[in-house]
Image (cartoon, coloured by chain):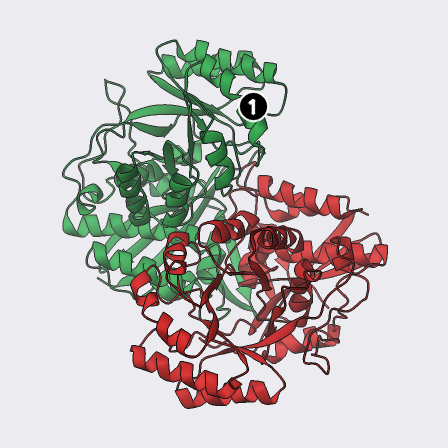
Chain colours: A red, B green
Amino acid sequence: MSIDAVDFFYLSMPKVEDIGDGSQDALVVRVAADGHEGWGECEASPLVSIAAFVTPMSHGACKPVRDVVLGKKIDAASSIAALSAAVEMECMDLLQAAHTFSGIEMALWDLLGKKLNAPVYELLGYKKAYPKLPYASQLFGDTPAETLAGCRKARENGFRAVKCGWGPFGKGSLNDDRDHLQAAREGIGQDGTLLIDAGQIFREDVEAAARRIPLLEEVNTVWFEEPFLGGAYAAYGALAARSGSVKLAGGEASHNVHMAQQLIDYGKVGFIQIDCGRIGGIGPAKRAADYAAAKGVTYVNHTFTSHLALCASLQPYAGLESHRICEYPFAPKSVAWDMSETHLTPDRNGEVNLPAAPGLGIAMSAAGMRKYLVDVEIAVKGQTIYRSPKI
Amino acid sequence: MSIDAVDFFYLSMPKVEDIGDGSQDALVVRVAADGHEGWGECEASPLVSIAAFVTPMSHGACKPVRDVVLGKKIDAASSIAALSAAVEMECMDLLQAAHTFSGIEMALWDLLGKKLNAPVYELLGYKKAYPKLPYASQLFGDTPAETLAGCRKARENGFRAVKCGWGPFGKGSLNDDRDHLQAAREGIGQDGTLLIDAGQIFREDVEAAARRIPLLEEVNTVWFEEPFLGGAYAAYGALAARSGSVKLAGGEASHNVHMAQQLIDYGKVGFIQIDCGRIGGIGPAKRAADYAAAKGVTYVNHTFTSHLALCASLQPYAGLESHRICEYPFAPKSVAWDMSETHLTPDRNGEVNLPAAPGLGIAMSAAGMRKYLVDVEIAVKGQTIYRSPKI
């Protein structure tokens, strides 16, 4: 198959709020090849990722992603890997290219699975997909009472695990943080799994993060996510050495497989969280999962957006039975829900199962996407180089 | 001073060729604050970096760079650092933001230096700027004869050091590489300093790179630059352990200070090469220089574009006397030369000296830039959010 067309659909809520909710917009990608089509999603900043697809070439190692992708042959998993390698070399100096290509790569797996009549996890070498235990991913409330209510709601909705993050955590006193942590524990119940996400608030300040460890231990926190800037591996490593029963988690910022490996090797995280919409797609994420498994680190998806992204993000570790937990967008904005006709709802055991269907197994909704489509036009030297396609 | 305006000027040669020459286009930034103005330059992919400045917000940690920068107070070096930290947090998920902000940060130092009537290197804490020995940075020829001619030309132009990179190196047989290396040595002369840049050609293949070490030693190569993908620290570390008299060099891909530190700590490079137009500007580059000096690693600028970028890139290590060498764009395209009225030409000793003038000390040329200005328009939801400014 030859890649005939790549179309980007920039979707957004009418109003985007200044909160840590990544489900407010989306960049959906459709790839067409020899009558087949596949769908993927890039994480973060749709306009910028579109620009990286269409931008004029700066030099031989700073090409638009389009120039590397269009017309390429895709017939097997190995041809997707070869294309990834070509993008790494030919878009070397185009920083945003990794995000742009992530959605394309995802769509290529979807397309190849449909063509070969196999779920993506089979193409990745897994015999079956094990069910995952979803955690409800949500923001801390502005007050402990709101945090309590949010966690109770997750519990009432059948979730046995919850993650609270961002919001006021780490910005006030230790007592403020303790109040939120106790509220979260009360909300999810004593037998629930509690995960805490600091949203990089401590930057590189190991001492400030370390002061929260006893509070996290009090409420039996399983992981402490992103205490530091995504690339500050030394700070992660220093905190890991004194984090007691709490394991560190991180990795969502990884935009190549090396970053994931290094956060494991040097940052000593216990959980490596990979966003397939950033790391370069499903192939590099699978490499990260293999590496994690070999190093005794647990792989977890990072997904705060749609069920297309969710379905893609579960493939790389679908066959790793003991890597049990998965991030589940608990209360996404309507754009993230409406874009697909099918969704991965938890089963009667409260577990998430990947569709045993060709490709990613998610049916997209043209009508759902149309409601949120953002009209974009980019012109260079008087020539339109991008205009939002119809859907 | 309050940041009143940030203007981007996308300049380009009429035709950009598919070669490893980064001087074919440029993104120049002008920042205005309280009647002062400063100039900076972002490295790589102008359109994408512009998009990262103006893009609609995706969520609280994925804002356009514009929203973080405009209106901020800049009165001292510390306020530039505070702004950098704000960009890291508020543009956390916008991958391209580091490149976009790099040019802005550079311009802020230029502006602050003009306001305080001090060269940037003084604002960075250096008492004086030591002269640097420039190396002529150029591509390998298509044939050994071309490589020989290029290096001879550099020598005839007064350069005592030359770097050859990219082109055919690493793509053919060991004998092909040897022929090019011998030609380069012959061209620069037995007493010249020879540097070799592999342009990431070996990706992560340590054995393939290691096979070149004896050839590099035969011609007394000082450094072997970027044998591997920018983030593949483990491969760098493995090669460093067996690179004999040749030291590894790398770091140009660093888009934050942690990446530079990690290439030193884990990649064991002997030379750390920082591009101020990528790492977030002059402040993070200074941190990288301090770190390198403390670890016994030599800091070098990475500059393949204009003399504005060159002047900015020398500031972070201007006061480090023993870090002697500097990259010098030997044969840039006319756009990179014409954009400024003043240039850093080597003195009678063949050395490069920073201007002892306020700010970066480079006078820009409106007429020079106007010739290469690329007209860009970006519209979202029918509203123009960016149009190339007049100059």
**Residue A289 drawn at (x, y percent):** 62, 55
Report the side of B202 relative to A173 (left or right): right
**x%, y% of residue B342?**
28, 34
Q: Residue at x 84, y 55 (%)?
A: A115
What is the chain identity of the residue bearing mark 1? B
Identify which residue is drawn at 69% across, 79% down: A346
Residue located at (51% from left, 28% from top): B198
Q: Is residue B383 left or right of residue A391?
A: left
Q: Disc 1 designates what residue?
A: B169
Residue B273's quadrant in the figure?
top left
Q: Give percent across and percent down for residue A61.
A: 55, 38
Answer above or below: position of A49 versus A339: above
| Extreme residue in the front direction | A245
Which quadrant of the structure image shows residue A46?
A: bottom right
Name the one closer to the observer, B232 or B20.
B232
Is residue A272 among what the camera can see?
Answer: yes
Q: Residue at 43% across / 44% down in the picture?
A: B43
Whether residue B225 sits left or right of residue B70 in the image: it is right
At label 1, which amino acid type do we have? Phe
Q: Quadrant of residue A157?
A: bottom right
Side of B370 where B362 appears, left or right: left
Q: Quadrant of the image for the C terminus of chain A? A: bottom right
Q: Position of residue B53 (x, y in %)?
A: 44, 59
The local crowd at label 1, few if under 14, some if 14 to 19, many if 20 or more residues have their Cα within 10 Å, is many
Front one among B12 and B290: B290
Q: Which secondary structure, mark 1? A: loop
Q: Nearer the viewer, residue B40 or A38?
A: A38
Work out whether residue B363 can be spotted. no
